[in-house]
Amino acid sequence: MTENAAWLGRDARKARKEGMPAVTRRQRERLADMVTHARTASPYYRALYHGLPERVEDPTLLPVTDKKTLMGHFDDWATDRAITYEKVRAFTDDSDRIGQRFLGKHMVATTSGTSGRRGLFVLDDRYMDVGAALTSRALASWLGPAGLLRAAAQGGRFAQLVATGGHYVGFAAYSRTLLAGGWRSKLLRALPVHTPMPQLVAELNDYRPAFIIGYASTIMLLTAEQEAGRLRINPVLVQPAGETMTTDDTDRIARAFRTTVRAMYSATECTYLSHSCAHGWYHVNSDWAVLEPVDADHRPTPPGQFSHTVLISNLANRVQPFLRYDLGDSVMLRPDPCPCGNPLPAIRVQGRSGDILTFPTRSADPVQLAPLAFGTLFDRTPGVELFQVEQTAPSTLRVRLLPAAGADPDRVWQTAHLELTHLLADNELDHVTIQRAEEPPRQAAGGKYRTVIPFDPSDTRL
């Protein structure tokens, strides 16, 4: 069997057509193969898996890993023994090498650190080819033959709203495609998320993309521009990524652009992890990934309940295996079949466990508020285009607002402040101070807006 791009595409379609027994069989076989490869070629995994059965098809037999631990064992983690932390860091420090092949073979991607420790990740061709195959499978499912023909009639152009200037996975993959040349490179354009909105709108109006992919918060800003009539495009698909969205958000995007909206829940560690359906559930690509919702002790969380965190296993990337990797998100596995008809496991994402705000109280027990509480609050506040709540002290919240075009900033603030005061009071947190920030919401280096930022006593900016 040769796992070239064409074979991967055929196999992805075949697995989906054959249903969950075929998907589960592939998952077991690929997990066993990845574990064998990791313990054979990686000194770190060889030591970690000492004493485990010779063949492992059950992920729960494996110890849990995380970004901090793997980065701390970087040189021993890689299965390509020519890879070292110093070499990768030197490569990523050079912006002229974005998209080039590290050691002549691999792609390198960094994470911005918005969800914790900065990551340096080495991704092989197999990983990239699997991602392309699963994306093609999702596009065919989302659009059908008629939608794909309409996209082709519009030129098939992709607009990627990405963070540029660094080795972030979206921009690195885009740069790699441009360097490779060919027909794909002519259909892609990367637009920096830091571009001033009037300029970004003008470029999109000129480019007229059939597909828009980008950070959810940036797409929401563009949605407001489309509603106002300044942005005038007719995409076949809008695909928010990188940040979780509410169904109200996706409905608003669909109305503004009169198009299909589908999201993806993924990470640099597994870019193809899942794709959403028409009912707002993310379906896990379980033929090439394992996703385990777990509690704080890494025991399985029952379907229908949100987990403390989630463990993922990437079954494609052999050069730096991610196996039972703690991603830090709170997810819920759907307990019944999804009405969309997709048999792949369906999940909802609540938000990163690290983004939950914890407040001291007058009693012994602290109170925690999830990001969703703030999201729904500001969603129903008229005139709010973008918000960011930062816990600058244990009992202090600093609120950054970007009002919608034409909205009165003072009136928006008064409404938001009242709603936030009620939320805190309802949770017996009326002692928490609310501050109005003069500055707008801050973007992290990777281009994302963190809507909720927990208190960090080590942050010297505070």
Image (spheres, helix red, strand yellow):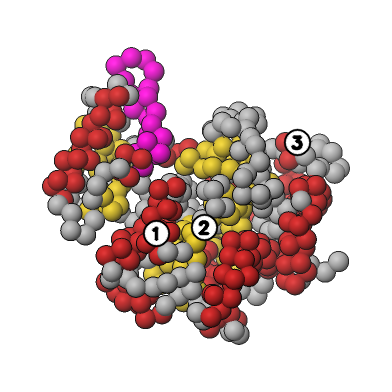
**Residue lying at the far top of the rendered structure:** 363
Task: Name which residue type carries label 3.
Answer: Leu
Indicate left or right for 172 with 447 as reference: right
**Whole-percent x and y of residue 441?**
28, 52
Residue at mark 3: 61
- Please state which amino acid type lies under the numbered disc 2: Arg
Look at the image and say whether residue 370 sits in the magenta stretch. yes
- The amino acid type of the residue labelled 1 equals Arg
User: Which mark is on residue 262?
Assistant: 2
Q: Secondary structure at mark 1?
A: helix
In the picture, the disc for residue 296 is none
Q: Quadrant of the N terminus?
A: bottom right
| For marks 3 and 1 on the same chain, the one whose residue lies earlier in the sequence | 3
3 vs 2, front mark: 2
Q: Provide the residue designation for mark 1.
A: 255
Q: Which mark is first along the chain, 2 or 3?
A: 3
Q: Nearer the viewer, residue 391 or 404?
A: 404
In this picture, is 335 found above or below 449?
above
Asked if residue 298 lies left or right of residue 371, the reply is right
In the rendered structure, which segment of residues is drawn in magenta? 357-375
Q: Residues within 10 Å of mark 1 (few under 14, many from 20)?
A: some
Q: Position of residue 40 (x, y in %)?
A: 80, 52
Could you tell me which secondary element the residue under label 3 belongs to? helix
Q: Is residue 430 visible?
A: yes
Q: Position of residue 152 (x, y in %)?
A: 56, 78
- What is the distance, in whole Å, between disc 2 and disc 1 at their CAs? 13 Å
Instruction: Say which residue appears at 32% left-offset and 71% top-offset.
Output: 231
The answer to if 367 sits in the magenta stretch is yes
Closer to the camera in the image, 273 or 298: 273
- Quadrant placement of the C terminus: top left
